[in-house]
């Protein structure tokens, strides 16, 4: 797939519906979007734009949307819109982290700068769920938590695995993602930040790389439905005393997801909402 977007799928929807649609376009197994962006449009609505390499893929994505979604597919000028859209992203601060693209130098006062150029993968740090995860990781380290083993489940660009290794450089870290592009991007992003970790393609826990493995810290910034569906596997993958950072959850889904993890015997604390998203910290 070329990184140069030729077609756009645009729609306006209510806030909750729009974020659900963005999640499906950006995270679903068959999602072929080069990038997905969400823009606030008043207090109750958002604009969603997904970029595609060809017209057929854009229309196929449109066909998967709810009938109520008023979406339009249109051709774009011959530009690399993924790179252009990223070049306009500002540096993002979250705790001691500063996430920046190659178009911006790392802030001189940043304790833990992270370089991320997302390309085909999701997770540049410019999303409420990612900001919340970075803050939670930072808080855990500040509280004296020191994991020896870390899993980044659904790693995207590898941002959270990189952040964790910035804090705990000796930890044995494994990352997985269902999307082959994300696995490649995560490896490149890690190298750009002067580090490396094992990253494998996997659908949830369906991989030999996770068989029988237990972790002190599990990071899962994915979607509410898959999180709830994997609650038992995530709980089982935690060492006693381990923590799970769970994100990708709209505010109105938080208790629904939290209940699934409480049912597995975990203590679950809801975190403050960030841009309409509530993350969870689970403790075994």
Image: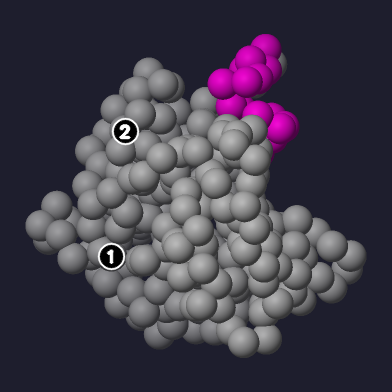
What residue is drawn where x is 15% and y is 60%?
207
User: What secondary structure do most residues of the magenta stretch adopt?
Assistant: loop
Q: Is residue 94 left or right of residue 208?
A: right
Residue 186 tag number? none
Q: Is residue 284 left or right of residue 237?
A: right
Residue 223, magenta (yes or no): no
Which one is earlier in the sequence, the residue at label 1 or at label 2?
2
What residue is drawn where x is 75% and y is 56%?
39
Figure quadrant of the C terminus: bottom left
**Separation of residues labelled 1 and 2 (CA atoms):** 19 Å
Q: Position of residue 216 (x, y in %)?
A: 32, 51
Q: Is residue 201 left or right of residue 185?
A: left
Q: How many marks?
A: 2
Residue 187 tag number? 2
- Which residue is the site of mark 1? 204
Work out which residue is located at the far top of the displayed protein and give it. 108
The stretch in magenta equals 87-108
What residue is drawn where x is 84% and y is 62%?
41
Q: Position of residue 177 (x, y in %)?
A: 32, 53
The local secondary structure at tag 2 comes to helix
Which quadrant would residue 21 be assigned to in this image?
bottom right
Nearer to the camera, 15 or 275: 15
């Amino acid at each position: 797939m070329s990184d140069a977007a030729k077609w756009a799928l645009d729609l306006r929807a209510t806030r909750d519906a729009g974020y659900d649609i963005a999640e499906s376009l950006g995270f679903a197994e068959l999602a072929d979007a080069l990038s997905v962006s969400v823009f606030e449009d008043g207090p109750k609505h958002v604009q969603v734009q997904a970029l595609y390499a060809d017209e057929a893929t854009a229309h196929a994505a449109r066909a998967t949307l709810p009938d109520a979604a008023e979406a339009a597919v249109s051709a774009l000028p011959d530009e690399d819109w993924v790179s252009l859209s990223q070049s306009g992203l500002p540096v993002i601060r979250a705790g001691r982290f500063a996430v920046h693209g190659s178009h911006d130098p790392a802030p001189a006062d940043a304790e833990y700068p992270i370089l991320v150029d997302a390309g085909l993968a999701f997770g540049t740090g410019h999303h409420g769920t990612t900001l919340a995860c970075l803050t939670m990781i930072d808080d855990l380290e500040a509280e004296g938590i020191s994991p020896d083993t870390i899993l980044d489940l659904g790693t995207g660009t590898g941002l959270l695995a990189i952040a964790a290794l910035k804090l705990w450089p000796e930890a044995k870290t494994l990352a997985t993602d269902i999307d082959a592009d994300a696995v490649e991007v995560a490896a490149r992003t890690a190298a750009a930040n002067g580090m490396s970790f094992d990253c494998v393609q996997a659908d949830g826990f369906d991989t030999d790389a996770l068989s029988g493995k237990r972790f002190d810290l599990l990071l899962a910034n994915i979607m509410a439905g898959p999180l709830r569906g994997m609650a038992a596997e995530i709980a089982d993958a935690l060492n006693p005393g381990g923590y799970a950072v769970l994100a990708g959850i709209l505010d109105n889904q938080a208790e629904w997801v939290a209940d699934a993890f409480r049912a597995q015997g975990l203590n679950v604390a809801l975190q403050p909402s960030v841009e309409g998203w509530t993350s969870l910290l689970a403790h075994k």
